[in-house]
Image (cartoon, rainbow, N blue to C red):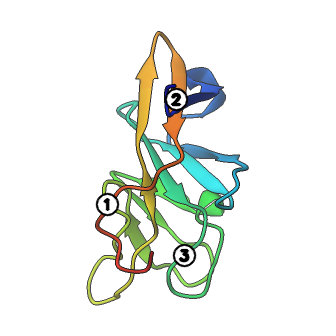
């Protein structure tokens, strides 16, 4: 059985925007860059738990709306000098459909 679940249509996620997917692991934020890349992160800033989905997307980062921490969309790590990590999830786009794996990527020590 496949681990991939269709969770959105690419057009549902505006460029430089996000959408939230509810999951057993908690909310997962889908982000779309200006170039059309899609990333999935735990919707919780490693600093104070702010909803990253409400932040501003720029380049391949999102700024947490609470304290402006910058989180890298590719690996979930905070940009130095800040420290911490939001879990990332595998995501793929095929035929305009967005698929998500609910198994988090490795590399985030907070998990």
Q: In this view, does 9 lie above or below 38?
A: above
- Residue labelled with disc 3: 45
Image quarter (top left, top right, bottom left or bottom right) of the C terminus: bottom left
Provide residue 101's location: percent of width, then percent of height: 49, 40
Provide residue 75's location: percent of width, then percent of height: 31, 60
Tell me the crowding category of disc 2: few under 14, some 14 to 19, or many 20 or more residues within 10 angstroms, Cα based: some
Helix, strand or loop at label 2? It is strand
Q: Are the residues at dot 1 and dot 3 in contact (C-beta closer than 8 Å)? A: no
Q: Are the residues at dot 1 and dot 2 in contact (C-beta closer than 8 Å)? A: no
Choose between 24 and 66: the one closer to the eye.
24
Q: Which residue lies furthest to the top in this view?
A: 95
Q: In this view, does 75 lie above or below 14?
A: below
Choose between 5 and 71: the one closer to the eye.
5
- Residue labelled with disc 1: 75
Name the N-terminal-most of marks 2 and 3: 3
Nearer the observer, disc 1 or disc 2?
2
Whole-Å distance between the Cαs marked 1 and 3?
13 Å
Residue 40 falls left or right of residue 80: right
For image coordinates 34% across by 51% down, the residue present is 59
- Residue labelled with disc 2: 99
For image coordinates 34% across by 52% down, the residue present is 60
């Amino acid at each position: 059985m496949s681990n991939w679940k269709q969770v959105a249509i690419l057009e549902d996620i505006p460029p430089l925007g996000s959408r939230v997917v509810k999951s057993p692991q908690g909310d997962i934020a889908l982000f779309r860059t200006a170039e059309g890349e899609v990333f999935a992160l735990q919707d919780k800033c490693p600093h104070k738990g702010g909803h990253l989905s409400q932040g501003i997307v720029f380049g391949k980062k999102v700024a947490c709306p609470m304290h402006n921490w910058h989180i890298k969309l590719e690996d979930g790590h905070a940009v130095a000098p800040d420290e911490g990590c939001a879990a990332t999830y595998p995501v793929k786009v095929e035929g305009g459909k967005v698929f998500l794996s609910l198994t988090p990527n490795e590399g985030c020590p907070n998990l």
